[in-house]
Each structure stands twice: as structure tokens, then as C-alpha cells.
Image (tube, grey):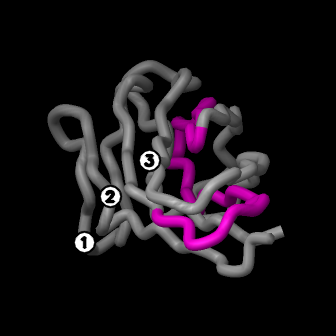
Amino acid sequence: VATDDISLHAKQAIVLGDGDFEYEQSAAAVIGWTNPGYHVVWPVKFETPGKYSILVNAATPVGGGGEFEVKLAGTVNAAKTGDGDKFQEISAGSVEIREAGTYRLVVIGVNISEQEEQLMQLRAVSLKAE
């Protein structure tokens, strides 16, 4: 049974993309997500198996937004960015971790609503034990 919540902060992420797609200190978030193929990766260590809800803390820049996926332990969950440019928790489904160990969590864009805009500003991903 999952016992611990896990928080993955943007500052600790591996950011894979070009140009201004990077962690930005003043926003405490990954910004510049102008290509849906860009992605953010974290290694995640699970001490115990169990089920976890996935929450993405992100803001949608004005004119931006779209769809993204969270990939973890063979599970792919699709989600949409929220409304407005304030940071909010976005539900990205849940995942079943069958064995303790280290996994890779990936957040990748699927599409961006408007060309030349940003998908989102990503601050953190939380895994909540169910």
C-alpha cells in the first residue's frame, strides 16, 4: 500500500528541449514550452508499491494551453491545461506502482492550442498515495 506522497519540483527536473525552454528561477517553473515535443523528466524512487494520484501544478500563459501526457511505470495519462494564468493543480489520473524501485516520470506535450504560444509553465508534479 502506498504510504508516502512524493513532490517533484521543476528545479530538480531534467528539461529536454531547445531555446528558452528552461527552468526559470523567478517563476519557480519550467517556461518557454513552445514545442509540444519538449518534455520534462524526473527520476522517482518508490519505497513501497501502491496506487498514486498524479497532480500537475502548472499555469497556462495567456493565449496558450493544450494537451499533455504524464508517463510513469508503463502508464500514459492524458490531461489538458487549466484556464487562466494562475498556477493550479491539474489532475492527470493515477498510476499503479507494482514494485518498489526507481522509475522515470515524463511530462510531454501532445499539442498546443495556438501556434507560437506556450503549452504551460510547469512548477511541480505531485504523486499522492491513494
Which residue is denoted by mark 1 in the rendering? 25
**112 horizontally vs 117: left or right:** right
Question: Please, is residue 61 above or below residue 79 in the view?
Answer: below
For the question of whether residue 70 can be seen, the reply is no
Image check: 42 left or right of 25? right
Determine contact: label 2, label 1, CB under 8 Å: no
Q: Nearer the viewer, mark 2 or mark 1?
A: 2
- Residue at left offset 75%, top offset 62%: 50
* Residue at image location 39% in from the left, 55% down from the top: 42
- What residue would you read off at disc 3? 104
- The picture quadrant where one finds residue 17 is top left
What's the amino acid at mark 2?
Answer: Ala
Alpha carbon separation for disc pair 1 and 3: 24 Å
Furthest residue toward front: 99
Q: CA distance from mark 3 to mark 2?
A: 11 Å
Does the magenta segment cover residue 48?
yes
Task: Find residue 110 and report its horizontal and vertical position in percent.
Answer: 55, 23
Q: Which residues are magenta?
A: 45-73
In the visual, does 102 lie left or right of 18? Answer: right
Q: Which mark is residue 13?
A: 2
Q: Amino acid at mark 1?
A: Gln
Q: Quadrant of the N terminus?
A: bottom right
- How crowded pointer 1 is (Cα within 10 Å; few <14, some 14-19, many 20+) is rated as few
Of the two numbered discs 1 and 3 in the rendering, the one whose residue sits closer to the viewer: 3
Most distant residue in the bottom direction: 4
Q: x%, y% of residue 99? A: 63, 55
Label 2 secondary element: loop
